[in-house]
Amino acid sequence: MGLVFFQSVRVKIQHFAAAAMVILLPNLALTESAHGIAMYGAPALPPDFVSLPYANPDAPKGGSIVLGNTGGFDSLNPFTVKGTSPWQLSIFTHESLMGRSLDEPFTLYGLLAESVEVPDDRSWVEFTLRDSARFSDGSPVTIPDVMWSFKTLGTTGHPKYRGLWSKIDAMEQSGPSSIRFTFKEDNRELALLVGMRPILKAAQWEGKVFADAQLNDVPIGTGPYVVDSFEGGRFVSLKRNPDYWGADLPLRKGTHNFDTVRLDFYGDATALLEGFKAGYISAAREFNAERWNKRYNFPRALNGEVVKTEIPHQKPSGMTGFVINTRRAPFDDWRVREALIQAFNFEYINTTLTGGAQPRISSYFSNSVLAMKPGAATGRTLDLLQPFADTMPPGLIDGYTLPETNGRESNRKGIRAALSLLEQAGWTPVQGEMQNADGTPLTLTILLAQGSSEHKAIADIYLGALKRLGIRATVETTDDAQYVARTGKFDFDLTYYRRALSLSPGNEQQFYWGSEAADLQGSRNLMGATSPAVDAMVQAMLNAKGHDDFVAAVRALDRALMAGRYVIPFWQFTSGRIAHMREMQFPQTLPIYGDGPRYMPEVWWWQD
């Protein structure tokens, strides 16, 4: 009897201990390594996928292409704030722990890391490096390289890398080839962002100041291409690394197929197009529908040497236009900003410059499911915005719609609306000049980079409308280096602005228009937005646990940004337009993101 009793007690204690282990160590039971990670749900591709669905795994290797950039460069280090580097470098020469699929809103698959592990609450993420991962000099990628890269970029690298670093509570080696990041806040996207940070070779920078890299200090990466030769400001030649470590990875099958990719630099877009017509450039992207229809009838296009290809997409429009610097008076007054928007005769400008073929951007996420709905806010979106209804400019709750004109140059309706708004803001026309109560005239300058011929044409037409309002407006052009420096320290009234957005916006939104980035030199918050409503909507988006809450928060953010009247929107690009040599081929299966920096030439190939 006593033996039975003690056996019973022992069984109960064992059961209790097992239950306690489940309670105290939930991550042990709930996590497991995976080949990929998605923002919501599971990755679409199975662990044994052969290649990305929009890549041709049998694409031949070979051929050489030349791509054109405008402006120049004085740096080959794309990871610091110092200098101007070719934007393609980070894509061709460096890699991250995970790689992104362009056919899913936000999903990553193993690249330098063979697997990823996260708990349900995503309070941490752990990556296991591939034994085969190598830098271009043949040395292995190590956990210390990863740790050095994160710390260096997060503290002395370009400001765009610092936001993530500030959210990491701990970074520790958790095994011979694994590393774990623990986060300070509840933010499910952080696990993915860690997977996308570029990894550099730590030993290269021993005894050097990374932030002060000179032109000859080319960062060593793990990517499929290496810098072969260059001439400052004129060209960079990249060659495909014959010993590239990741050539057989499913994520890389059928990608990076050209033997060499040369980047040539031209003074402006007109010179670049002429270079393409003459055969010095292999492919060119066109962003103007009128030019696409009328300027690509040169001999090489007519005889078939050049092919015109349109690639549709399902991504948001993003925002393109003249951004208004709200740090400066009187542009800190929403009524002045709305007056500038009313005076911008989009329909006339669109007809004049594009033949009216491209629709106007109606919001930051237009052309996608994330775009704000017309009319008044409802449901969860309304709930999110309601606390800010009395502190935001009109349109937050009831809806904001851009003005439409009849397409005539005079735009009398828009000019009348602009005059009324300016008078409400304390500005009065005096002998044809808009002045405030002190007699100070209203002046503004539109800052543009040299070579921005289309943006200059838009600004020139716009100046006529501003002159009719009595505003002293001028256009100032400067070279690329000066332009980057001035916009980096927010030294402008208005300037050209392009902010591409994805189907899975996340933490980068804080860097784009969050209050903390408003005065951070080099940040993307060019408008200087310091809106509690915008900040709160970004946070609601980051805290969303499910897709429906996420969509509601993004639509609320869209409303807050539009009501802020930070940008005078131009037209949107509903498809990518690429003119290219006929030998340049691409798969017929297209990704949902369409064309973009990682599409052409990444999955294209040369076919004689």
Image: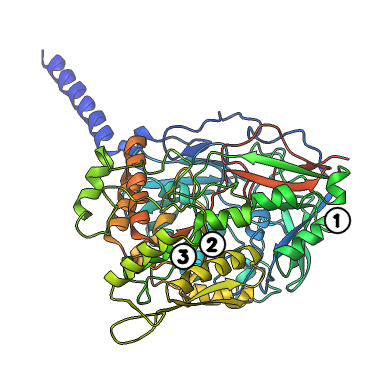
Q: Specify the quadrant of the image occupied by residue 99.
A: top right
Q: Is residue 541 above or below residue 30?
A: below
Q: Is residue 154 above or below residue 560?
A: below
Percent of width and height locating residue 49? 61, 30
Q: Which residue is mark 2?
A: 149
Q: Which secondary structure lies at badge 1?
A: loop
Sequence order check, earlier mark of 2 and 3: 2
| Foreground label between 2 and 3 | 3
Q: Amino acid at mark 2?
A: Ser
Q: Tell me what residue is drawn at x 75 percent, y 62 percent.
A: 272
Q: Is residue 464 above or below residue 123?
A: below
Q: Nearer the viewer, residue 22 or 387?
A: 387
Q: Amino acid at mark 1?
A: Gly
Q: Which residue is mark 1?
A: 279
Q: Which residue is mark 3?
A: 323
Q: Which secondary structure lies at badge 2?
A: helix
Whole-angstrom CA distance, mark 3 to mark 1, is: 36 Å
Q: Nearer the viewer, residue 523 or 140?
A: 523
Q: Is residue 311 left or right of residue 415?
A: right
Q: Nearer the viewer, residue 345 or 607?
A: 345
Q: Which secondary structure lies at badge 3?
A: strand
Percent of width and height locating residue 144? 54, 59
Q: Amino acid at mark 3?
A: Val
